[in-house]
Image: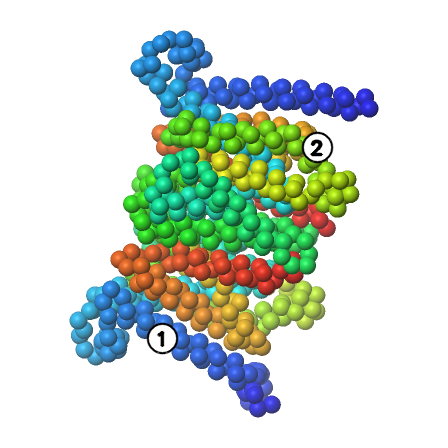
């Protein structure tokens, strides 16, 4: 048994084992994440050398590109990281709960619901209340959409696949509502809204970054805390119930987690598609045995994907700044097709 | 026997009533908008020779083309929906859901933005090509695997195709922002601002396809009873499939070239028509034609009347009605299966 570590507290209240290989792989994921972050920070219209970044982070010496690094790239790269991690975990949860490998918050319409609510707020209420309340409304929209989907799922004859179809319908309804709001309101600049809706990290500021950073870590710790339940649920309804899992409350709590994570990311970056769908598939290949580790790896890979995608979208098409959502959809859709082919016998 | 005859009589009467309704909607489409006209105004503009008159210009330059386009594309989209639901044997299988709209738009955008094609007579063929491309892609993906084409697989394939075409379109547009205004109306989906030339460019294809589909009713009935049965009854199933595919692609692509991305018509109307006349295709197609025209006329009228002076894209109106309907059909399908 030397391919694993056994972790025990003295009174054996907590004990679990970790497979060494999976731990190493997770560490590798996070090393790559640091690499992706550095890439995003260093290379752009002009190159900022590594030592300047170190100088800036630890405040060792004043640097030349302080504005470009501190005000433009840092918030953008960091919020890309959080958005990616949040979407990836939201996707992992949704796929686990609906037990469908092709589900994700954007496919079943939750991203759309969050966007509707955010656009409604930005159009009609933001002048009175201030833009900083947008995340609250995005999260509210995500929760309402999840609630609707959950209500459908309570019907005993609705299968997981039908649930995805219903989500697809909700998604197009959300698109229509957003377009309607944009067309009928004069106050909202439609070009900016369009950019935001396709999912862009353009002009993200520190306030947004810090607020989603805090929100994400609180949620992430809560999710990690309850991974045991997630594991039980994956054995199937009847076994999970026998092992003492309250299915109803489990589903509600985890869907709520997913809605909150999804709303967080929509409020900053709009609808970045396919990250929630794609990432869990990659991370499940890396980590198979340990659910907490799976969540951690998923967060890491989601973060890498968004940071890299945003870097390519920003850097490769210069002087244009392509919204990262367009780019992830361009890569994600073919991957989705691949998943369809791979899972062709399971529907 | 007597009963069937009586039913057929009812169906003829229904057809007549729908035609009446269609005419009323056509007149309403000419009468109402930012400025409202009476029937007498329309009659006057027809008889008077003064073509500089404001009423004359509004009615015949703007509202008349819109009316014609709504009638023709509404009918075409509805019948394209009938055919694609038959082809995919799936109550949710309409062109827009299967990503055929966005495939067509992608190819149009490539032509307009990258190759500077602006002649609609040429673009129509590319719209057909795009529709065909998307149809093949989705059908191929949907029919993979051991189990035959299942609803969820097709719809997911449609989502994937849709997302891919939309993102490719957006990348092209973002990289060539000058071309954006040329193609934006195709993406939003609207009848406003279309001229008679545009519909004339596609009219022959659409009309021929509509007529052919009407005459195919009996063969469609046979095909609908299942491929093996159709083979047993002596139908060449392959030729039937190809014919239906071509008809669908021409109807969907042709309408799309004129009015852009207007979804869900092909989803709603066939279900509505089935609710009225049942599953027989010889009746289903004409009813869908009439209902589709009426639906699009009303939808187009509401784009002008809901929120004046802003005009809401037609695609938004159809999605408002169509998306809940899609959810309803998905929900009902879930109940019927078990």
Give the vertical position of B42 relative to A278 (above or below): above
Name which residue lies at 42% across and 39% down.
B123
Name which residue lies at 31% across and 59% down.
A317
Q: Secondary structure at mark 2?
A: helix
Give the vertical position of B98 relative to A62 (above or below): above
Q: Say which of A55 and B145 sits in front.
A: B145
User: Residue B8 shows which numbered tag?
Assistant: none
Which residue is under mark 2?
A: B218
Q: Chain of mark 1?
A: A
Q: Secondary structure at mark 1?
A: helix
Q: Quadrant of the N terminus of chain A?
A: bottom right
Which residue is under mark 1?
A: A35
Which residue extends farthest bottom?
A2
Q: Does residue A337 appear anywhere in the picture?
A: yes
Q: Say which of A157 and A130 sits in front.
A: A157
| Image position, residue B23 (x, y; %) | 53, 19
CA gap between label 2 and label 1 equals 65 Å
What colouring style does the render use? rainbow
Q: Chain of mark 2?
A: B
Q: Quadrant of the C terminus of chain A?
A: bottom right
């Amino acid at each position: 048994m030397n391919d694993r570590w056994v972790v025990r507290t003295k009174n054996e209240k907590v004990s679990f084992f970790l497979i060494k290989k999976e731990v190493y792989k997770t560490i590798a994921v996070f090393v790559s994440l640091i690499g992706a972050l550095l890439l995003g920070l260093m290379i752009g219209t002009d190159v900022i050398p590594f030592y300047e970044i170190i100088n800036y982070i630890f405040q060792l010496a004043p640097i030349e590109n302080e504005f470009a690094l501190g005000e433009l790239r840092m918030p953008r790269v960091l919020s890309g990281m959080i958005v990616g991690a949040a979407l990836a975990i939201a996707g992992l949860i949704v796929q686990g709960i609906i037990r469908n490998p092709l589900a994700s918050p954007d496919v079943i319409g939750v991203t759309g619901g969050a966007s509707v609510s955010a656009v409604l707020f930005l159009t009609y209420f933001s002048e009175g209340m201030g833009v900083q309340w947008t995340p609250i409304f995005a999260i509210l929209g995500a929760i309402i959409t999840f609630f609707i989907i959950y209500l459908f799922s309570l019907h005993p004859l609705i299968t997981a696949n039908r649930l995805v179809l219903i989500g697809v319908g909700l998604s197009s309804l959300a698109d229509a509502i957003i377009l309607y709001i944009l067309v009928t309101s004069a106050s909202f600049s439609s070009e900016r809204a369009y950019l935001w809706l396709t999912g862009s990290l353009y002009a993200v500021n520190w306030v947004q970054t810090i607020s989603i950073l805090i929100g994400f870590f609180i949620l992430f710790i809560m999710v990690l805390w309850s991974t045991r339940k997630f594991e039980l649920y994956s054995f199937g309804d009847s076994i999970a119930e026998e092992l003492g899992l309250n299915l109803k409350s489990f589903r509600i709590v985890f869907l709520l987690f997913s809605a909150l994570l999804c709303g967080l990311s929509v409020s900053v970056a709009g609808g970045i598609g396919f990250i929630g769908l794609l990432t869990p598939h990659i991370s499940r290949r890396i980590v198979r045995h340990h659910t907490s580790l799976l969540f951690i790896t998923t967060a890491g890979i989601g973060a890498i994907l968004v940071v890299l995608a945003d870097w390519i979208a920003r850097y490769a098409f210069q002087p244009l700044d392509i919204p990262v959502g367009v780019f992830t959809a361009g890569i994600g859709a073919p991957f989705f097709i691949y998943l369809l082919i791979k899972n062709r016998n399971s529907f | 026997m007597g009963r069937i005859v009586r039913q057929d009589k009812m169906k003829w009467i229904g057809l007549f009533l729908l035609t009446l309704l269609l005419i009323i909607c056509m007149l309403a489409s000419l009468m109402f908008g930012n400025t409202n006209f009476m029937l007498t105004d329309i009659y006057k503009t027809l008889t008077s020779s003064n073509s500089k008159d404001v009423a004359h210009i509004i009615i015949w330059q703007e509202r008349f083309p819109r009316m014609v386009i709504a009638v023709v594309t509404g009918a075409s989209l509805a019948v394209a929906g009938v055919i694609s639901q038959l082809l995919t044997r799936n109550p949710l299988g309409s062109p827009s859901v299967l990503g055929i709209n966005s495939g067509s738009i992608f190819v149009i955008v490539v032509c307009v933005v990258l190759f500077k094609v602006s002649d609609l007579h040429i673009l129509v063929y590319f719209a057909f090509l795009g529709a065909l491309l998307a149809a093949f892609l989705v059908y191929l993906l949907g029919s993979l695997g051991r189990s035959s084409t299942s609803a969820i697989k097709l719809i997911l394939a449609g989502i994937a195709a849709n997302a891919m075409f939309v993102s490719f379109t957006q990348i092209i547009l973002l990289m060539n922002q000058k071309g954006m205004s040329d193609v934006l109306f195709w993406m939003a989906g609207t009848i406003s601002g279309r001229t008679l030339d545009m519909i004339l460019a596609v009219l022959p294809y659409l009309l021929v396809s509509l007529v052919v589909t009407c005459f195919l009713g009996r063969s469609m009935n046979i095909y609908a009873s299942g491929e093996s049965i159709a083979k047993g009854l002596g139908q060449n199933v392959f030729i039937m499939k190809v014919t239906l595919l071509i008809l669908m692609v021409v109807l969907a692509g042709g309408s799309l070239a004129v009015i852009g991305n207007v979804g869900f018509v092909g989803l709603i109307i066939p279900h509505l028509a089935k609710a009225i006349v049942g599953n027989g295709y010889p009746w289903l197609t004409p009813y869908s034609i009439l209902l589709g025209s009426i639906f699009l006329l009303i939808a187009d009228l509401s784009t002008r009347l809901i929120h004046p002076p802003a005009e809401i894209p037609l695609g938004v109106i159809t999605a408002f009605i169509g998306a809940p309907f899609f959810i309803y059909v998905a929900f009902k399908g879930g109940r019927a299966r078990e």
